[in-house]
Image (cartoon, helix red, strand yellow):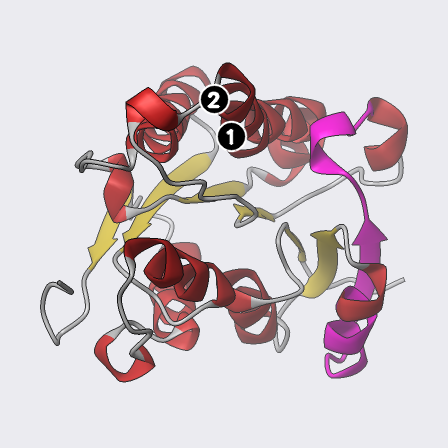
Amino acid sequence: MSDRPTALITGASRGIGRAVAQALAPTHRIVLGGRDEAALAQVAAGLPDATVWPVELTRVTAADVAGIERLDVLVHSAGIAPLGRIAETSAETWRTVMDVNVVAVAELTRLLLPALRAARGHVVCVNSGAGQRANPGWGAYAASKFAMRAFADALRQEEPELRVTTVYPGRTATDMQRKVREHEGGAFEPERYLEPDTVARAIMAAVFAGPDAHLTELTLRPAAGPVT
């Protein structure tokens, strides 16, 4: 077994999660979390020390994390972004987005707290600009991201031996952003957005900050400016 520090990343098969896994791979043993086992295996094949962890995060149990006794980094990157005006958003949609973006994050963290405490580890919550400002048509998603922010703030105070960082990326060139732009009726223009690797580098700055530094919040916005 590797004696390198261990990092578990959810949503690791694509987008920001995959970029974070690749950025941490030179220094960490990587646990790739997600639902698409085949896609996770493809990511793992390109990393020096990676394990595939196929899991449905909304149904994770203690048995799923039983083999993780020490965890140095936990990155919550999985999430969904259903959009729609409040008048058009069903209770089922509200429950689903909260379950994936908030409850699953809280429960996985709770189950892994013994392993995180053993390593005096670091929890990174990949949030969104929607976790700082709610726009029309983004009610359910923004509410889930505001809740994720509150979760991270509470965890930081309850577990002072851990480092807890919330990252607020603006629009990023991912499959999720492509779907968002389709819903908005706008063009997908990746050259105007953040690259997943750029967000990953910001997360690395928090993870590798010296022991005297605790980067609690990081906000990134595309240099191209707001998308209309």
User: Percent x, y for residue 199?
Assistant: 36, 66
> Which residue is at the front of the view, 24 or 173?
173
- Residue 209 at least partly seen: no
- Residue at the image position 36 percent from the left and 75 percent from the top: 195
User: Percent x, y for residue 147?
Assistant: 37, 23
Q: Say which quadrant the C terminus sits in.
A: bottom left
Q: Which mark is residue 139?
A: none
- Residue 29 at least partly seen: yes
> Which residue is at the front of the view, 176 or 72?
176
Q: Which residues are magenta?
A: 40-61
Q: Secondary structure at mark 2?
A: helix
Whether residue 210 is in magenta: the answer is: no
- Residue at the image position 17 percent from the left and 36 percent from the top: 133
In the rendered image, which residue does mark 2 sit on? Answer: 94
Q: Amino acid at mark 2?
A: Trp
In the rendered image, which quarter is residue 113 located in? Answer: top right
Asked whether the beta carbons under mark 2 and mark 1 sit within 8 Å of each other, the answer is yes
